[in-house]
Amino acid sequence: MSIKVLHQGLLTTIQDLGRYGFQKFGVIVGGAMDSYSLRLGNLLVGNTENEAALEITLYGTKLQFEEDTLIAITGANFLPTINDKPAPLWSPIIVRKNSVLKFHTAIDGSRAYIAIAGGIDIPEVMGSKSTYLRANIGGFKGRALQKGDVLPLTSSKVFNSKTSKIRQKNKGNWSINYNELINLGKHQIIRVIQGTEFDRFDKESQHKLLTEVFTLSLQSDRMGYRLEGSSLSLSENFELLSEGVTFGTIQIPPSGQPIILMADRQTTGGYPKIGQVISADLPTLAQLPPKATIQFKLVTLEEAEQAFIQNEQKINLIKKAINFKLYP
């Protein structure tokens, strides 16, 4: 079983939930920008939530399936088609042998995921299949996909049993509701907690962060989102040693324009940290396209924890519903 890349799109990579345990050696976590879409896609095809999938960015790719394959498309809406007919989103799909799946330009969100029953048959590097582009490790030859690549797939008993049940019971005409987990709108209110240097910024800058609108710059990628808007400044300059950073850390460089660190962020940073995006809002943040707008809302650590717990509970309910649909 395999998939042939007919067109690579802007940036298509293989990602799972990341490479953990190696930051002390300078190796980033990486992984899917929108972890919720990846996890739900895998659940729809019977994989473990951490199985690697294809992450497609901003505009499309074109793939040919060399065998019957069970897939799910989640995340952004790229108006996907299979043999020029609209393909459903957030639902299990049986793609027939030699069929062509094509993605266009995203109309909602910025990243789509293709989960494949059984997964992609590539080796793990440091416990992960995720592509780390700057180090050229993981994924398919450590790089983004290119025209002509052939991705080997894992033959799966899960695929055979689930496709059989879907075909016999006509259970493919349904989809899951992701709206309470991910918002694909072009303007978002993103919740944050105070960063470790929040109190070192002047009162005006603290106020601007939480009241003004910032625009996502074209100079944004998997490593970081550069924001355009009011300049933020410290009350007084001070020396800051580099220290650990994470997905969603909001740093303020000398320019005063915020940078939000994303999935491929470095392991340490030396800029003052004014805020931290809460975990529950990272998938929505990851789906923002260039020129989208952001407003930040300050919440407490307890509120951030509660939002995370609530989202995990929603995912567990979706998991139970999927199992009911596929195994009635």
Image (tube, rainbow, N blue to C red):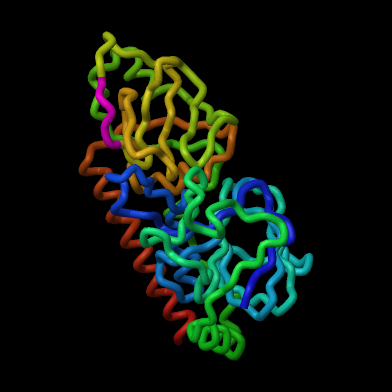
Count of numbered circles on the image: 0
Q: Residue 183 in the image: state x and y as whole percent.
A: 49, 48
Question: Which residue is at a point 67% across and 62% down the rendered structure image?
Answer: 149
Residue 174 appearing in the image: no
* Magenta span includes 164: no
Q: Residue 215 in the image: state x and y as whole percent.
A: 53, 27
Classify 150 as above or below 253: below
Rendered-image quadrant of the C terminus? bottom left
Classify 158 as above or below 136: below
Left or right: where 137 falls relative to 317: right
The image quadrant of residue 174 is: bottom right
Q: Residue furthest right?
A: 84
Q: Please, what is the dominant secondary structure of the magenta stretch? A: loop
Q: Residue 288 in the image: state x and y as whole percent.
A: 53, 41
- Magenta residues, start to end: 240-244
Question: Which residue is at a point 38% across and 46% down the rendered structure image?
Answer: 28
Question: Which residue is at a point 74% across and 73% down the rendered structure image?
Answer: 99
Q: Residue furthest top?
A: 236
Question: Which residue is at a point 43% across and 64% down the rendered structure image?
Answer: 124
Classify 89 as above or below 298: below
Classify 232 as above or below 89: above
Q: Residue 95 in the image: state x and y as whole percent.
A: 66, 75
Residue 245 appearing in the image: yes
Rendered-image quadrant of the N terminus? bottom right
Left or right: where 22 falls relative to 174: left
The image quadrant of residue 175 is: bottom right
In depth, the one of 311 and 130 nearer the eye is 130
In depth, the one of 60 and 242 nearer the eye is 242
